[in-house]
Image: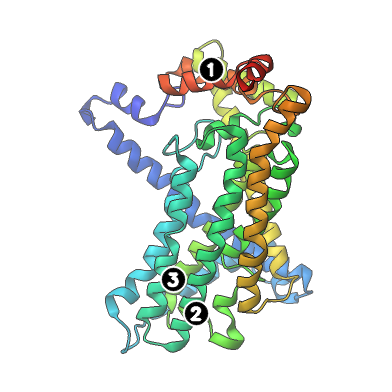
Amino acid sequence: MFAANSIAEYLDQNVAWLNGCGYWVAALIHALLLIHVFALSPFAFIWLERKVSGRIQDRLGPTRVGGLFGWLQSLADGIKLIQKEDLCPPAADSMLFRSAPYIVCVASFAVFMVLPFSHGWVAVAADCGLFILLAILSLEVFGIILAGYSSGSKWSLFGGMREAAQMVSYEIPLAICALIPVIAAGSLNLGEIGEMQRGGFWNWFVFHDPFTFFAFFVYFVVATASCKRAPFDLAEAESELVGGFHTEYSGMRWSFFFMGEYASMFAVCGVASVLFLGGWNTGLPFLDDALSSARLNGATGAGPWAAGYLANVLGAFVFVTKASFGVFVQVWLRWTLPRLRIDQVITTCLKYLVPISCFLFLGATVWPLVLLQVSQTTTLTAPLGDRFGGALGEARLRGSVPAASVSRAQAASVSVSSVGEVAR
């Protein structure tokens, strides 16, 4: 199974009794794998939140309780929430009230379908993967609005309106900053974008040009705000809103909102890892080249398939480590910075972050043209097409890249002199 191009291909070729239903079974396997990522990441990050807050603010409880390293505390929280009574206020719209937490969870969970965890390890390898990811991530706001509206409480309604205004506002600079590395890559396929950053860490898009460098930090700020994290958590300002849009929720339905929040934190940090920080690439040229050769040899049969599989396991570990470090920074900011007022949150977005992101987008567009006029090249490092050539050859040998993608990648790998001639 590990040597096959995909799980569906293996099932169709080796399990006769499925009678051509391999893709349905493969879809179920992908869903089960991703639901465990969705469920276990909040478990780990809640533990991380307790530990970081305990160390930063000298809270003795999180540093003492919970067994070995405190991991039992998250388990105890889950057991407690399962046992709590599921309440629905008499004034609430029962159907909308009960369905809102599931909408939030589905929006956060569906993001992982197009998020690559390593080379080729993605449920849906879409050429417009980034577009789909941003579109799905924005659907979470519908669950927030329904939760606030259907609760029958003015405090929940105010919290839902605040959160809707905040999320819709910050989605604008979030999408613009995410498109800046896309300009450099020339592709919306997250797998291709990750492969273009293979080699040394200087090939990562965060170091591609000054505009992608600053875009990374703006993206991280707006991603933190879009996940309702402090200092932007005005939708849950306890001093004003008694808990915000989820005031009337209890038990597991209350926990679903936070499962979606922590999963979204991991998702946006994973996107930052793929777009700016090399994705599953280590940033060490000798190691990345060795892992790429192991994947290629495993795919072509020139070497053991287990070596290629272990190379992908290491890539997934690198990706998860980068994304988890981003979550750690978000937790660090929560327990360090004071909360802003709601007018300051919206002003920061519309008055500062949106113009800054637009300026960076325009600069990233003009940058290669300026370089072409000055130095007859469009990049300060090796052309992206040359870096992507090895990954393209591997994909072609595996038979997983359509002809359109092949021609596009071949066209991207033309020499610098040819680019200059075309520009002239």
The answer to whether mark 1 and mark 2 are in CB contact below 8 A is no
Residue under numbered circle 3: 144
With respect to residue 415, does 127 lie above or below?
below
Residue under numbered circle 2: 159
**Residue at left 65%, top 15%?**
415
For disc 3, the neighbor class at 10 Å (few under 14, some 14 to 19, many from 20) is many
Question: 332 or 346, which is in the foreground?
Answer: 346
Question: 315 or 345, which is in the foreground?
Answer: 345
* Residue 104 on image: x %, y %: 42, 64
* Residue 401 on image: x %, y %: 44, 22
> Which mark sits nearer the N-terminus, 1 or 3?
3
For disc 1, the neighbor class at 10 Å (few under 14, some 14 to 19, many from 20) is some
With respect to residue 189, does 15 lie above or below?
above
The reply, left or right, for residue 324 in relation to residue 100 is: right
Q: To which quarter of the image does residue 209 belong?
A: top right
| Residue type pointed to by label 1 | Gln
| Residue type pointed to by label 2 | Gly
* Residue 263 on image: x %, y %: 52, 57
Do we see residue 71 in this rendering?
A: no
The reply, left or right, for residue 159 in relation to residue 381 is: left
Numbered tag placed on residue 21 in the rendering:
none
Q: Nearer the viewer, mark 1 or mark 3?
A: 1
Mark 2 residue element: helix
**Residue at left 48%, top 62%?**
260
Name the quadrant of the C terminus. Answer: top right
C-alpha span from label 3 to label 2: 9 Å
Residue under numbered circle 1: 410
| Residue type pointed to by label 3 | Ile
Exactly how many numbered labels are in the figure? 3
